[in-house]
């Protein structure tokens, strides 16, 4: 299991996390409502679990993990990400609400680094899985199915694009009208690079390949990948334009070991 004991001053971490949340809201105008929907889905699906185990996939600085822990105070929350700087913010901002692990979803065996002592009851993700190309996303879903109990739930909140060009264009136009003023993604990272207290973490981040761009995967492709991974029921439960909360329920029988079929993108 990967564990990084390095920590930042909590007040400094909170400043940067607040700025992170503000710039993210430029791109996800209903972000807090989206977080609330994820919490409601988990509360409903895990109502029979005394101490549910929830994994935040691509957790970044812990925005979703922290909100999930407050919504489900009895849950054990684990976050995983490959960005040492964002993980340091998460560990310092939420030292008691969740456990954060550094691992790369693109590498085989990443889930072995989580130190899980039982099957997952749920996995969540917010604005993260679009960084993965389809082949890697398929493997990630298969790994999550392998680590999850039958009946467990996966909740993915992200921009999931329509395959119809005209509909996708309308959704993109709606997203552009919601962009506000203030700090954006690029200026946030530029400011982080200029913060002396974060210099070591910035250097570590530059040593590895983080991020990966937007692979613009549609709901139908996510659906196909999830079903082939071992999730028997898949569907959106909330949507605003191309901002979608997609839910998948792990089947009684997992698809581990099956030969995957090609996905048309």
Image: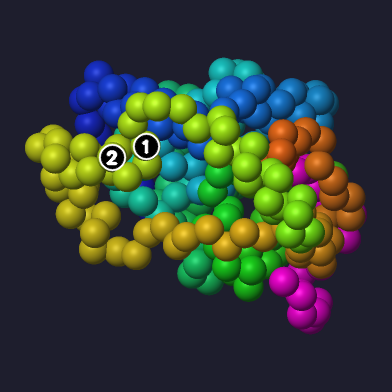
The image position of residue 264, as x and y in percent, is 76, 75
Quarter holding residue 171:
top right
The image position of residue 208, as x and y in percent, is 30, 64
Secondary structure beneath disc 2? helix
Task: Look at the picture and state if 146 lies above or below 169.
Answer: below
| Residue 258 falls within the magenta-colored stretch | yes
| Residue 209 falls within the magenta-colored stretch | no
Task: Look at the picture and state if 181 lies above or below 106.
Answer: above
Q: Is residue 168 left or right of residue 248?
A: left
Q: Is residue 60 left or right of residue 174?
A: left
* Residue that label 2 marks: 187
Chain part drawn in magenta: 246-265
Question: How many neighbours does mark 2 have within 10 angstroms: few (below 14), some (14-19), or many (20 or more)?
Answer: few
Residue 122 appearing in the image: no
Task: Look at the picture and state if 256 lies above or below 170.
Answer: below
* Dot label at residue 77: none
- Identify the residue shown where x is 30% and y is 38%: 188
Q: Nearer the viewer, residue 211 or 81?
A: 211
Residue 57 appearing in the image: yes
Question: Main SS type for the magenta part?
Answer: loop
Asked if labels 2 and 1 touch by Cβ distance under 8 angstroms, the answer is yes
The image position of residue 210, as x and y in percent, is 37, 59
Image quadrant occupied by the N terminus: bottom left
Quarter holding residue 75:
top right
Secondary structure beneath disc 1? loop
* Residue that label 1 marks: 184
- Identify the residue shown where x is 56% and y is 30%: 178
Image quadrant occupied by the C terminus: bottom right
Q: Is residue 262 left or right of residue 77?
A: right
């Amino acid at each position: 299991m990967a564990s990084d004991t390095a920590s930042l001053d909590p007040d400094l971490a909170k400043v940067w996390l607040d700025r992170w949340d503000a710039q993210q809201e430029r791109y996800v105008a209903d972000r807090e409502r989206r977080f609330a929907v994820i919490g409601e889905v988990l509360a409903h699906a895990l109502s029979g679990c005394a101490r549910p185990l929830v994994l935040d996939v691509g957790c970044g600085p812990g925005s979703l993990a922290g909100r999930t822990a407050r919504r489900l105070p009895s849950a054990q929350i684990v976050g995983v990400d490959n960005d040492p700087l964002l993980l340091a913010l998460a560990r310092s901002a939420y030292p008691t609400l969740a456990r954060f692990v550094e691992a790369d979803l693109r590498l085989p065996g990443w889930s072995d680094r989580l130190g899980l002592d039982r099957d997952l009851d749920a996995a969540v993700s917010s604005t993260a899985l679009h960084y993965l190309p389809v082949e890697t996303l398929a493997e990630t879903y298969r790994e999550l199915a392998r680590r999850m109990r039958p009946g467990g739930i996966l909740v993915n909140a992200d921009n999931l694009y329509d395959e119809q060009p005209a509909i996708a264009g309308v959704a993109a136009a709606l997203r552009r009208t919601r962009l506000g003023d203030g700090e954006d993604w690029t200026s946030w990272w530029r400011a982080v690079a200029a913060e002396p207290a974060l210099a070591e973490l910035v250097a570590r981040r530059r040593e590895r390949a983080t991020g990966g761009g937007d692979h613009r995967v549609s709901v139908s492709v996510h659906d196909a990948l999830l079903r082939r991974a071992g999730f028997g029921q898949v569907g959106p439960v909330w949507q605003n334009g191309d901002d979608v909360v997609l839910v998948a329920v792990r089947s009684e029988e997992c698809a581990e070991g099956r030969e995957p079929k090609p996905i048309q993108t």
